[in-house]
Image: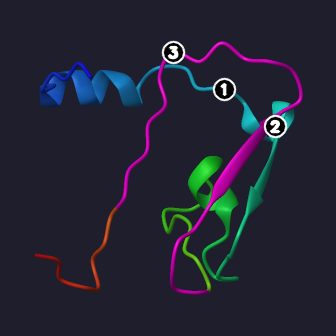
Amino acid sequence: MRKRVITRALRTAATQQEWLDLEKIASVEITSEDDAFPIESALLGRGERGWRAAEPGIQTIWLIFDEPQKLGRVSIVFEETETKRT
């Protein structure tokens, strides 16, 4: 496995790149969803609340593309503000 530490400038540049229009080219399957935090919030940028599972435990999110896609970068951000972690 290759690894490199990226700078804040690279992270910012990645968020400003053009993203795929998932609403038009893919469907999503999830194992659980809190009604107040739908997956669309996370994938389509609708609201700033993001997605949250309705049940504890391992969660799965599958993106199913209508046509094969060449992906160069996938960005996933996890933010936990309610429970302290060690």
Q: Position of residue 24 (x, y in %)?
A: 85, 34
> Magenta segment: does it hold 62?
yes
79 sits to left or right of 21: left
Between disc 3 and disc 1, whose residue precedes?
1
Q: Main secondary structure of the magenta part?
A: loop
Q: Position of residue 85 (x, y in %)?
A: 17, 77
Task: Give the amino acid type for the residue marked by disc 2 in the picture.
Answer: Ala
Determine which quarter of the picture holds residue 21.
top right
Tell me the element at label 3: loop
Tell me the element at label 1: loop
Callout 2 touching callout 1 (CB < 8 Å): yes
Determine which quarter of the picture holds residue 66.
top right
Q: Which disc is residue 7 wearing?
A: none
Q: The N terminus is located in which quarter?
A: top left
The Cα–Cα distance between marks 2 and 1, rounded to whole angstroms, is 9 Å
Between disc 2 and disc 1, whose residue precedes?
1
The Cα–Cα distance between marks 2 and 3, rounded to whole angstroms, is 17 Å
The stretch of residues the image draws in magenta is 55-78
Residue at 52% x, 72% y is 58
**Residue that mark 1 sits on:** 20
- For disc 3, the neighbor class at 10 Å (few under 14, some 14 to 19, many from 20) is few
**Residue that mark 3 sits on:** 72
Q: Position of residue 73 (x, y in %)?
A: 47, 22
**Residue that mark 2 sits on:** 26
Residue at 31% x, 72% y is 80
Determine which quarter of the picture holds residue 22.
top right
Q: Visible in this render: residue 64? A: yes
